[in-house]
Amino acid sequence: MLVSLCVIAYNEENVLNGLFRNIASQTYPHDKIEVVLVDSNSTDNTRAMMEDFKNTQYNFKQVIITTNEKYNQASAWNCALCVSTGDVIIRIDAHAQIPRDFIRKCVDNLEEGEDIVGGGRPNIVDNETSWKLTLLAAEESLFGSSIAEYRRPTEKKEYHDSLFHAAYRREVFEKVGGFNESLGRTEDNELHYRIREAGYKMCSCPDIISFQHTRNSLRRMIKQKYGNGYWIGLTFGVCRGCLSYFHFAPFVFLMALIAFTVAACLGYAYPLMFLGLAYGMFDFTNTVGCFMTKKVKPQFLVLPFIFPILHLAYGIGTFVGLVKMPFWKHKLKDIPYKRIEEVRQIMLKNRADREN
């Protein structure tokens, strides 16, 4: 199988060299790997690093560098799909690390009959410090990040609603089309919804694993959570089926906090007291869990404060997204869906050209 390994990047000079080393060390035959690099008009050395990687003799079938003029992730992934010629499309974030046998194991599992495969995706930090490990503990906690099963390694093959750093048979995109370019952080949720609706299953395999760098500062983590929540709010207006109830948990917490605070001001304090007690119990329990399961750092003492900050940032983002959603949705019309079909047609043409 010819594999198209796709990476998109915008100002990622701090992490690309590590990922490029991972790609260069892959045990899958390099003459069966096509590396597709998409630069979203970076203003740092990202483009130059891509060119250096292309010019280094790793004996790949080819290294393609293309430019994304629209900046957002969905359009960047569509740029990658439009130039890919492989039988297998693998999507890897620039902030990732992959083991030497990553491509090999993805292909092995696809050859067993699966259409889409992936595996656990634990978070890691670079240049470890006590503070970064504290942020990592918050991100890895079910309370601080997500209860989604596809984030964590499995002991046996399981089928999930979504996967990180997945490998797709080309035919999947040829059937469902490309990414919805109107979406920001939720483009993968919407794509995977269409994939499931088309009858495909996404298999999480125990022997496949990849890693994602977590944010290195609380400010950047808060910004990330706000952005995630914001796009959940907007996406609710165009694809409710691609979202689950847990996506709205921080929003519900925020609304309950506001409502119960108003009630307390009017003399009904018990709802707010109950909410505070229930939240405090989960907060305390998950903090203790971090102390028991991680290598303890003094900064772990601030975890009870980090958790609510992240939840409120996410909830506020969702609230803002929901408020803006009707106006944003009205402007979309059918332009994003035309692009989805355009990408599908380009991929079908690329297949025909390759076979001829």
Image: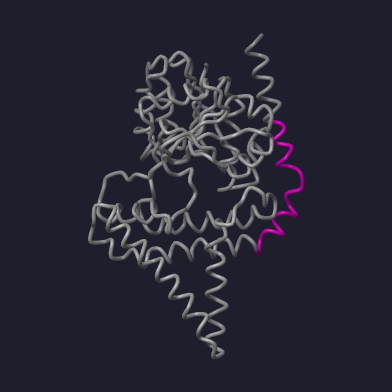
Figure check: 218 above or below 338: below
Q: Residue at x 40, y 34 (%)?
A: 209
Q: Quadrant of residue 229?
A: bottom right
Along the horizontal axis of the image, is 210 left or right of 89?
left
Along the horizontal axis of the image, is 292 left or right of 190?
left
Figure check: 135 above or below 5: below
- Closer-to-camera residue (242/325): 242
Magenta segment includes 333: yes
- Residue 24 in picture, x, y percent from top left: 37, 23
Q: In which quarter of the image is the C terminus?
A: top right
Q: Is the magenta region chiefly helix, strand or loop?
A: helix
- Residue 11 in picture, x, y percent from top left: 44, 41
- Residue 1 in picture, x, y percent from top left: 52, 16
Figure check: 67 above or below 74: above
Q: Which residue is drawn at 59% across and 53% down?
A: 244
Q: In which quarter of the image is residue 288?
A: bottom left
Figure check: 354 above or below 340: above
- Residue 265 in picture, x, y percent from top left: 53, 88
Q: What stretch is highlighted in magenta?
A: 323-342
Along the horizontal axis of the image, is 121 left or right of 70?
left
Magenta segment includes 69: no
- Closer-to-camera residue (345/52): 345
